[in-house]
Amino acid sequence: MPPKLDQIDHRIIDALTANARMPLTDLAKSVGLSKTPVAARIKRLESEGIIKGYRAVLSAVGLGLTHVTYVEAKLTDTREKALSAFNDAVRLIPEVEECYMISGGFDYLLKIRTQGMPEFRALMAERISTLPYLASTSSYVSMEAIVEVGF
C-alpha cells in the first residue's frame, strides 16, 4: 500500500521537482512550515522511496544527442530466463534511455538517443541486434519532441 501523502508533502515534492537545489529555508517558507519539520518530511519521503534521488537535468541538444528512435523489439522466447537475459543485456547499453516491457504485438519498446543516424545504425548493428533472444525489431525515428520531461 502506498504511503499516505498530505497536501504539504505534495507541495514539497512539487517544489523539489521544479528545483531540487532550493535552499531549505526557501522551501520551508513556500510550504508554510519551519525548516525542521520540512527537513523531517524530506527525510521521510526519501526513506519511503517517494524521493529516490536528486540529479542534474541535462540538455540533449547541448550534448549533441538529438537523434531519438523508438525501437519495438520482439523476442524468440518470453519465458523468465529469456526475459531476464534480455533485461540484463539492454541495461548495459547507455544509449537506451528507456526500455519498457509491453503487452501487445511486440515485447519491448526502447527509447534510444544518439548523435545521429550513423551512430544509431552502428548501435543497431553492433549492440541491439546482438541482444539475447531478439527475433526482430521495428524502428521509428522521432522528428520532433513535443513534450519531453527531463533527459
Image (tube, rainbow, N blue to C red):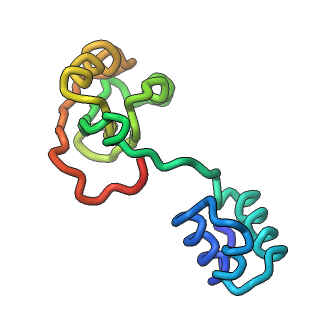
Which residue ends up furthest to the bottom in the rendered image? 32
> Residue 22, percent across and down?
63, 65
> Residue 110, percent across and down?
33, 37
Which residue is rendered at x = 60% and y = 60% of the image? Answer: 20
Q: Quadrant of residue 134?
A: top left
**Apparent side of residue 142 relative to residue 41 in the rendered image (left or right):** left
Which residue is rendered at x = 27% and y = 38% of the image? Answer: 66
The residue nearer to you, when weighing 9 against 34, is 34
Q: Which quadrant is the N terminus positioned in?
A: bottom right
Which residue is rendered at x = 25% and y = 25% of the image? Answer: 120
- Residue 87 visible? The answer is yes
**Apparent side of residue 25 relative to residue 2 in the rendered image (left or right):** right
Q: Quadrant of residue 38?
A: bottom right
Q: Is residue 101 above or below residue 15?
A: above
The residue nearer to you, when weighing 90 against 121, is 121
- Residue 81 visible? The answer is no
> Residue 3, percent across and down?
68, 69
Q: How many numbered marks, from 0 up?
A: 0
Which residue is rendered at x = 43% and y = 25% of the image? Answer: 93
**Apparent side of residue 142 relative to residue 46 in the rendered image (left or right):** left
The residue nearer to you, when weighing 85 against 109, is 109
> Residue 33, percent across and down?
75, 83
